[in-house]
């Protein structure tokens, strides 16, 4: 039976059986393949772990970078907030100082208003005294200073704040002269002499007012010229005032309302010019009757005819100007009652008045008695009206060139330029803004039409 099995079964002899060799070969190949596969798996795992470590390191670096950038941004925002807070505090301090300045200015304005009221009362007293004097002169009686009927008026005049010592002494001297002349001369001659003295005093006062207005116009021209060229105001820009005016004229100007309406920096420059020229004998010996600077004399030429008639115009203000002043006061009072601020649209309701009326009104003491906001709005209304003239296709000027220059509507011709045609070709023309350039071009066209 064993022989049957050996004959019928397979021969498992390792040496002679080919299947055995094949299986053995396959087994060795599988074993080698397994070893290679294991090594590759190990290598890939090691590479995978390295990649994970690199990714973790990159992520940590990125997070660190983000945190540093966020910290820098936060620090930058904090610095900006600190700078903004510092600027806000500086602005608040500047506003506080400005409020204090406005309060002091309002106090000064209130004092000026009180003085003006006292001046009106004093003028009423003087008118009454002059009427009584004229009546006594017609009756041939002399005026006695020690008269018992007038001690109260004399004490009121003496105690009046707005009248200085020199004015009081001059008034007493005039009374003495009148009392002396009444004993020796007829009443008609006394009346003529007193009227001539009053006319000379009023003429001198009007000339002083006119001169103060001229100084103020000159200062405004300097300011507008520097602003049109985009330059800062310096003390040297106002040194020309020392060439055109006397020390006494500039001192009187510093006491006027026009000077007080200027900015504090401009007032400081003018005061500094006066202080620097205090010890200059040529500056104190100059006469304002004859302008020294040729450029300024050109600006005075349109007003030579006004000097002779200024006293009469000052004494007899046109009725239309008085009506304009009363209407403006009514507008201001209405807004004060309603507790609202006066704006430009409220002044535009004055349509019945012309531009010449407004400009003439700004040169009176009634205009100077207004508050700073009302004066600013009135000047703004005039400037807008003058500016609209340049919007027309064919330019027609309604006022003198000085009026446009003073209000900053057009730039002033620099020294050495005869007309705006030459000025348009200069480098200074290129420094102007677009609006002023367009207006200068309109002026050149107007000059060409006039020449043709």
Image: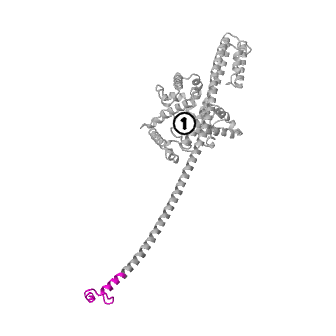
Query: Picture quarter containing residue 122?
Result: top right
Q: Residue furthest top?
A: 139
Asked if the stretch drawn in magenta spans residue 274, the answer is no
Mark 1, residue position: 406
Q: Give the magenta-colored segment's residue range.
A: 1-27
Which of these two is toward me, 345 or 84? 84
310 vs 42: above or below:
above
421 vs 204: above or below:
below
Which of these two is toward me, 343 or 274? 343
170 vs 64: above or below:
above
The quadrant of the rendering that contains the C terminus is top left
Could you tell me residue 373's position as x and y percent? Answer: 55, 31
Could you tell me residue 184's position as x and y percent? Answer: 72, 14
37 vs 153: above or below:
below
Total tally of numbered discs in the picture = 1
How dense is the environment of label 1, judged by Cα within 10 Å: few (below 14), some, or many (20 and up)? Answer: many
């Amino acid at each position: 039976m064993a022989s049957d099995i050996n004959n019928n079964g397979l021969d498992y002899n390792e040496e002679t059986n080919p299947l055995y060799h094949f299986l053995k070969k396959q087994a060795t190949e599988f074993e080698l393949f397994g070893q290679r596969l294991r090594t590759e798996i190990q290598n890939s795992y090691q590479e995978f772990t390295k990649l994970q470590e690199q990714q973790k390191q990159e992520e940590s670096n990125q997070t660190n970078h983000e945190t540093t950038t966020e910290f820098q941004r936060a620090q930058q925002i904090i610095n900006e907030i600190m700078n903004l807070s510092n600027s806000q505090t500086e602005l608040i301090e500047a506003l506080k100082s400005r409020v204090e300045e406005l309060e002091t200015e309002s106090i000064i304005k209130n004092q000026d208003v009180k003085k003006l009221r006292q001046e009106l009362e004093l003028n009423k007293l003087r008118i009454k005294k002059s009427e009584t004097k004229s009546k006594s002169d017609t009756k041939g009686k002399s005026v006695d200073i020690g008269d018992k009927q007038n001690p109260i008026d004399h004490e009121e005049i003496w105690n009046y704040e707005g009248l200085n010592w020199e004015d009081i002494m001059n008034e007493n001297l005039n009374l003495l002269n009148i009392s002396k002349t009444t004993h020796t001369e007829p009443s008609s001659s006394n009346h003529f002499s007193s009227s001539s003295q009053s006319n000379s005093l009023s003429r001198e006062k009007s000339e002083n007012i006119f001169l103060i207005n001229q100084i103020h116009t000159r200062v405004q021209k300097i300011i507008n010229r520097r602003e049109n060229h985009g330059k800062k105001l310096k003390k040297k820009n106002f040194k020309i005032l020392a060439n055109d005016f006397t020390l006494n004229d500039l001192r009187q100007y510093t006491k006027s309302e026009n000077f007080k309406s200027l900015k504090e920096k401009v007032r400081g420059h003018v005061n500094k010019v006066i202080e620097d020229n205090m010890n200059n004998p040529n500056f104190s010996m100059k006469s304002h009757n004859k302008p020294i600077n040729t450029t300024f004399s050109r600006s005075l030429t349109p007003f030579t005819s006004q000097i002779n008639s200024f006293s009469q115009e000052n004494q007899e203000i046109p009725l239309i100007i008085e009506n304009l002043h009363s209407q403006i006061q009514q507008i201001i009072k209405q807004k004060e009652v309603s507790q609202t601020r006066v704006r430009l649209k409220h002044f535009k309701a004055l349509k019945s008045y012309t531009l010449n009326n407004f400009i003439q009104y700004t040169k009176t003491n009634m205009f100077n008695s207004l508050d700073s906001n009302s004066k600013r709005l009135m000047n703004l209304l005039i400037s807008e009206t003058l500016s609209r003239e340049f919007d027309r296709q064919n330019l027609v000027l309604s006022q003198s060139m000085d009026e446009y220059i003073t209000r900053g509507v057009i730039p002033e011709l620099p020294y050495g330029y005869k007309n705006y045609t030459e000025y348009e070709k200069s480098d200074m023309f290129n420094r102007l803004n677009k609006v002023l350039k367009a207006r200068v071009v309109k002026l050149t066209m107007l000059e060409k039409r006039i020449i043709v």
